[in-house]
Amino acid sequence: ILILIGLCLLSYILGSIPTAIWYGEAYHGVDIRTLGSGNAGATNTFRVLGKKAGSIVLFVDAFKGFLATSLSTFLFYLHLIDWQTCVSLKIVFGFLAVLGHLLPVFCDFKGGKGVATLMGMVLALHPEAALVSIAVFLLVFYVSNYVSLGSMIASLVFPFLMVFKVFGDEFPILIYFGFIVAFLVIFMHRKNIARILQGTENRMYLIPRKKQ
Ligand code: G3P
């Protein structure tokens, strides 16, 4: 039980690493929370600090979720837990990492929106479903030019794939988890939703437009 508490804490601390804030401060001398959308995430880093910074933040934020979720797989391979417990613990550790990203202990509990970390988590939890969600994200982003809309719709893809058993029978816990997290992601985007409805949401282009 002590190992379990330790791993829960570790997952939350991993998720708490405020990549966008630290990268912005270290390499550009800026506080990302005061620029662009003000969000401490990969999208805003792309927007404000460019492709290289955005890609690094995206990778690290996703890796935090992937690593925390995979802690459970280590326990399984060490024969400490069975497969069903492994899936449940993946959800617990991954969820704590996403929570850490939303409410980071290192910066007054004000973090990002959890999308990249959630993507890393789902990649470790259910790679096939993660790939479908990423494809949906890219499609919605490409068509609408809104990253936020892509993120929200992609977060809903996972629970629906589980409900309709697209990949066969799944543990019911994946469905509950999927809907709770999708709700959380949409809630974190409440200001984006208001901006989309007002037509003032930031547009970004998946394929950069040629300068006129
Ligand atoms: O991952 C966050 C994204 O969906 C929206 O970010 O900066 O446009 O609020 P942003």
Image (cartoon, grey):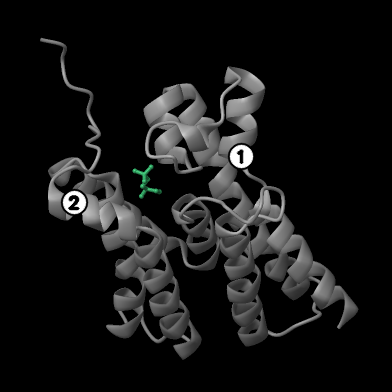
The mark tally for this picture is 2
Q: Residues within 10 Å of mark 2 (few under 14, many from 20)?
A: some
Q: Can I make out residue 136 in this image?
A: no
Q: Residue at x 54, y 40 (%)?
A: 59
| 141 with respect to 167 (left or right) | left
Q: Residue at x 38, y 78 (%)?
A: 179
Q: Residues within 10 Å of mark 1 (few under 14, many from 20)?
A: many
Among the 4 quarters of the image, the one containing residue 15 = bottom right
Q: In the rendered image of this protein, does residue 123 appear above or below residue 199?
A: below
Mark 2 vs mark 1: in front: 2
- In the image, 162 versus 200, the foreground residue is 200
Give the position of the C terminus as an image quadrant: top left
Give the position of the N terminus as an image quadrant: bottom right
Q: Which mark is residue 196?
A: 2
Find disc 1 in the rendering and name its residue: 19
Disc 1 residue type? Answer: Thr
